Image: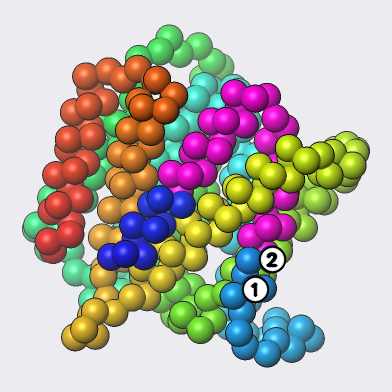
Amino acid sequence: MIFLVFSILSSAAIYIIFKYLDRFKINTFNVIIINYITATILGLLLTNTQVDIFSIYKNAWFPYSIIIGVLFIMTFVLIAKSSQIVGIAITSVSNKMSVIIPIAVSIIIDPLDVLTNFKALGIILAILAVFLSVYRKRKVEFDPRKIYLPIILFLSMGLVDSIVKYAQHYYVADDILPLFTVILFAMSAIAGLVTKFLRKTSFNELLDIKILLWGIGLGISNYGSIYFLIKALNYKNSVGNTLDGSIVFGINNLGVIALSVIIGLIVFKEKFLKINWIGIIISLLAIYILSKT
């Protein structure tokens, strides 16, 4: 469970960093690129095994790390575009609700992840808690034809987490994890650099001290979020049992939302509706139920 706590803390740190980037008007895309480079270096530092760079593509997990890495940068661009066109509120709900997909995938591919009535109740409460926690009462004005953006975001975020679960379940043991993350984040970094090149913006921007410092902080947090998530999925207790993937994803998502709300309230003085507080209470209840299944 400690790995799950670290994953939640890492993901919440990402939320804090993005808040400050928005407050200080710092170029987010440049920070994202440095973040992926930092995460790649962290993976290299944690890799203890000898790596044959010319045969690494032969590993069964290699295609999944490539796919996840590319999807990471694509979903980032999609989140930014959806936020601008259909609004932050709808984008946020779409992003958080995508947890439904990896939960379903985990139950399908893992024979030990059985959907009991008690777990089903926890999952239903988790989905309700996510919606209520991120709900914002705002006037929504956008072209209905653009509704495909949050829908694609919902599917994309769910797909990323689902591939992570699939790769972890079949291929990525703890000894492979650092190398897996190296390829994953390296692909994200390459995709980001290629995108920057196609946009024809200056690469010198990446050397700005503010970009470097925020990028390194984000990279450490980003690496921790996926590293500890997979460690939580791999973790076995004293009798050799692992936590069900559906429970890990559910608690992780709810924990990040609850902690983000608390940080937003205390640090950023954000105002929350009564319905958001109801969502937080339900999320705590859902976490308790899922942790007991």
Mark 1 crowd level (few <14, some 14–19, many ≥20, 10 Å Cα): few
Establish if 87 lies above or below 28: above
Provide residue 71's location: percent of width, then percent of height: 61, 54
Provide residue 2's location: percent of width, then percent of height: 31, 64
What scheme was used to colour the molecule? rainbow
Determine whether, in the image, residue 13 is placed left or right of residue 282. Answer: right
Give the quarter of the figure containing the N terminus.
Answer: bottom left
Does the rendering let one see residue 252?
yes
Q: Quadrant of residue 214?
A: top right
Secondary structure that dominates the magenta span: helix
Establish if 284 lies above or below 51: above
Please give the name of the residue rendered at 24% of the width and 79% of the height, measured from the top-left corner: 237
**Helix, strand or loop at mark 1:** helix
Tell me which segment is drawn in magenta. Answer: 11-40
Specify the amino acid type for callout 2: Ile
Determine whether, in the image, residue 240 is placed left or right of residue 45. Answer: left
Please give the name of the residue rendered at 23% of the width and 32% of the height, measured from the top-left corner: 279
Residue 156 magenta-drawn? no
Q: In which quarter of the image is residue 135?
A: top left
Specify the amino acid type for callout 1: Leu
Q: Residue under circle 2?
A: 41
Disc 1 vs disc 2: Cβ atoms closer than 8 Å? yes
Does the rendering let one see residue 30?
no
Mark 2 crowd level (few <14, some 14–19, many ≥20, 10 Å Cα): some
Provide residue 67's location: percent of width, then percent of height: 62, 63
Please give the name of the residue rendered at 66% of the width and 51% of the height, measured from the top-left corner: 216
Residue 31 magenta-drawn? yes
Q: Which residue is at the front of the view, 41 or 69?
A: 41
**Helix, strand or loop at mark 2:** helix
Q: Which residue is at the front of the view, 236 or 155?
A: 236
Q: Residue under circle 1?
A: 45
Give the quarter of the figure containing the C terminus.
Answer: bottom left
